[in-house]
Image (cartoon, rainbow, N blue to C red):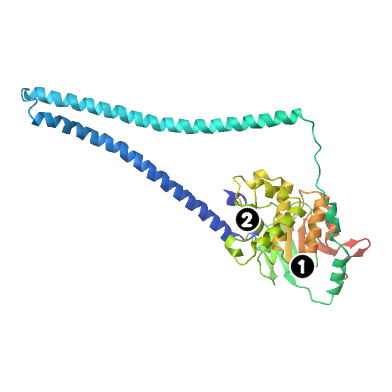
Amino acid sequence: MQIRSNSESAAFFRSGRVENDKSNKHLFNLINTQHKLIRKEYALNFAVNLFDYLGSIFSYIAIAFPIFLGAYDSLSSPDLSALISANAFVVIYLINCFTKLLDLSVKVTNIAGTTHRVVELLQVLEKLKNCQDTRLASRPQEIRGFGWSEMETLMNNESEATCQSETSVDPVTAFEINDLEYTAPKSSKKLCTGLNLRFEQGVNILVTGTSGCGKSSLLRVINGIWPEVRGTIDYQVDLKPSVILFLPQKPYFTDGSLRQQIIYPLREFDRRGSFISTEDALIGEYLEKTELSHICERTRGLDTEPDWNWYDELSPGEMQRLSFVRLFYHKPKFAILDEATSQIGIDAERAMYNLCDELGITVLSVGHRDSLLQYHQFELHFTGSGDCSIKPIQHHGASHIDR
């Protein structure tokens, strides 16, 4: 169900192997549980049925001893037959009553289990009620917003000097789009025609346009989820998390620990050569910079698997910031972000993009906010009629790059 509901988000991460491993793990756990249940039920049913069959046999064996020892030699054949039948009836009746007791004990066990769950629910509700009464009785406290002012200093003169010193070096290209045309599957409406684009390291691109004009569809085509009608997309880098990482519009979280959410789509045994202590310090730093350290406290560490659904426990803003922690952990050269900051504030958005710049991550972003313009050098705009245009973004009267 989780994979089916989040199939596109999982596809953006190209995490088929990871989800296959997790699905097999859950399946094997289910099979093992079923085996244990079957073995226990087999023992119980075997004992009950054995008592039913052997009980009637033992009744005849019990009456056979006095008969063959001569205790009933004075009885006629009809009277002896009646005695045997009456004895067998009494024994079978007792066996039937005892069987009903066993069946009743099974029902009592089910009722006891249900009652235990209901009692636990009532206890939890009582605790919640007490907590609510305590909060209402106390003085309400103001909710403090996240402090992102300290993150505004990440963009400094050093990054500008680095850009100037590397102007003589040929930029690395992630992919090049040539005369691309695409439509939605099973649709004849052209979302884009004649698109030519090169995604180079150090050049951030913002994709804009009205809803439904084909912005997210472009990312699906780039990732290979949707086919192109015409044109080519020439990749010059490997599509792996350490090189290029997609953050889909709907954040995707699998089951497992906090560490597994951050290293996704990597698996545990893909990290055998890493130093866990160094990794823990790095993850802790990114959680602190994104104001998510409290999640680590709630999960009681990075490797403790909580018994909750991440989508139920995290707010939309927390999910998007945790997705950025995943991005910072992998630290790819390129990142493709689809509405990745739509649920967080302007200050948090500034912190995320500044940290991307500090880590040397070149981004291709899809978004509607005007505040995103300052973090990109080019704007790819979709008109909604199949046409698109790309132009440099002017900052304070001048473009960030001279091309």
| Dot placed on the residue nearer the N-terminal end, 1 or 2 | 1
* Residue found at x 31% / y 38%: 47
Tag 1 residue = 197
- Residue type of the residue flagged with mark 1: Leu
Q: Nearer the viewer, residue 32 or 129?
A: 129
Residue 8 found in image quarter: bottom right
Circles 1 and 2, Cβ within 8 Å, touching? The answer is: no
Tag 2 residue = 260
* Residue found at x 8% / y 30%: 69
> Where in the figure is residue 85, as x and y percent of width and height?
16, 26
Q: Is residue 395 left or right of residue 59?
A: right
User: Which numbered mark, 1 or 2, is in the foreground of this view?
Assistant: 2
> Where in the figure is residue 250, as x and y percent of width and height?
69, 51
Residue 361 found in image quarter: bottom right
- Residue type of the residue flagged with mark 2: Gln
> Can you say which quadrant of the picture contains the C terminus?
bottom right
Above or below residue 183? Residue 296 is: above
* Residue found at x 23% / y 27%: 91
Q: Residues within 10 Å of mark 1 (few under 14, many from 20)?
A: some
Q: Nearer the viewer, residue 391 or 50?
A: 50
> Where in the figure is residue 338, as x and y percent of width and height?
73, 56
Badge 2 marks a residue whose secondary structure is helix
Q: Is residue 339 visible?
A: no
Q: Is residue 268 visible?
A: yes
Q: Nearer the viewer, residue 157 or 217?
A: 157
- What's the distance in space between the residues labelled 1 and 2, CA to CA? 34 Å
Q: Residues within 10 Å of mark 2 (few under 14, many from 20)?
A: many
Badge 1 marks a residue whose secondary structure is strand
